[in-house]
Image (cartoon, rainbow, N blue to C red):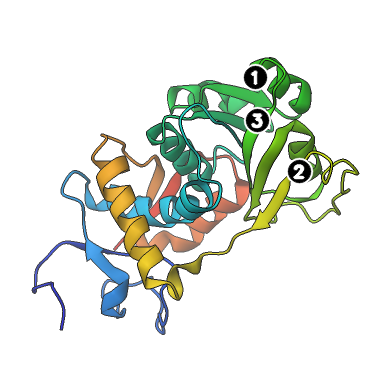
Amino acid sequence: MTAFERGDAVTVLPGVRPLRFGTYGETILVPDVAVVAQPPELSAVEAAALWVAHLTAYAPLVEIAEVGPGDVVLINAASSSVGLAAISIVRRLNATPVALTRTRRKADLLLRLGAEAVIVTDEEDVVGRTHALTAGAGAWVAFDAVAGPALTTLLHALAPGGIVVQYGLLSQEPMLFPLDVSARKLTITGYGLDLATDTELRRRAYRFVKDRVVAGAFRPVVADTFPLSAAAEAHAVLERNTHVGKIVLIP
């Protein structure tokens, strides 16, 4: 049985299996556990841009790192959809999001979208800037999409007892493990999208995003939209990696 009726506006949660036939279509078939009501505050395009990013960021920040008021959180790949979601979630937790981005081109936009500060990694000393922003204390949490040498840098930028939640592998380079990780009591933990198997996590994540993020007047950042027939062009835009926010296909 389902709580929905024909004609209800719904969206699909990420990571729920089985999605046997994909979702690039005017009509799609998905299991009912993957379907949620479209938040009335959002347009269909905004709702489509919401769930993957925010549900990816929810568990690492809320349940694993337990970000709380006053915590400083480093977010690399901050202009990605997950990075932007992390900024919005950290704000809702009354903590301080610090965005890391490779070039200055996106810095002003990240500040407008909620980052407390931006560190340009190709130009600035990440560890030095972090300590300057935190009066020498270091950040409490790092949300890492990159791995490789960037993860080593994040560890150096953490306060004693801090945690890195590593969820992405944008870098294919090896990581150097700092010798003082044990002495500083740092934690490194990985995270994958567990929504497929954990029904309660999926319910908590949905409720947090709906009640704390969307109801807090957040609107997903949509970089561009394409008709479904131009899916290949949309993927080309993704591969150029010059956009900020989500690319949405419209059937």
Residue at horizontal 44 percent and vertical 47 percent from the top: 246
On residue 134, which mark appears? 1
Q: Residue at x 53, y 58 (%)?
A: 235
As drawn, the label of residue 139 is 3
Q: Amino acid at mark 3?
A: Ala
In the displayed structure image, the side of residue 161 where residue 182 appears, left or right? right
Q: Secondary structure at mark 3?
A: strand
114 relative to 74 in the view: left or right: left
Q: Residue at x 50, y 45 (%)?
A: 66
Counting other residues with Cα less than 10 Å from the Cα at mark 3, is it few (<14), some (14-19), or many (20 or more)? many
Residue at horizontal 60 percent and vertical 24 percent from the top? 118
Badge 1, how many Cα within 10 Å: few under 14, some, many 20+?
some
Q: Are marks 3 and 2 in contact (CB under 8 Å)?
A: no
Q: Which residue is mark 2?
A: 185
Sequence-first tag of 3 and 2: 3
Query: Looking at the picture, how far across and down is residue 87, in whole percent?
Result: 48, 36
Q: Position of residue 35 (x, y in %)?
A: 27, 69
Q: Are marks 3 and 1 in contact (CB under 8 Å)?
A: yes
Q: Amino acid at mark 2?
A: Lys
Binning the other alpha carbons within 10 Å of mark 2 as few (below 14), some (14 to 19) or many (20 upward) gives few
Q: Earlier in the sequence, mark 2 or mark 1?
A: 1
Residue 205 vertical position relative to residue 79 in the rendered view, above or below: below
Depth check: 28 or 65 in front? 65
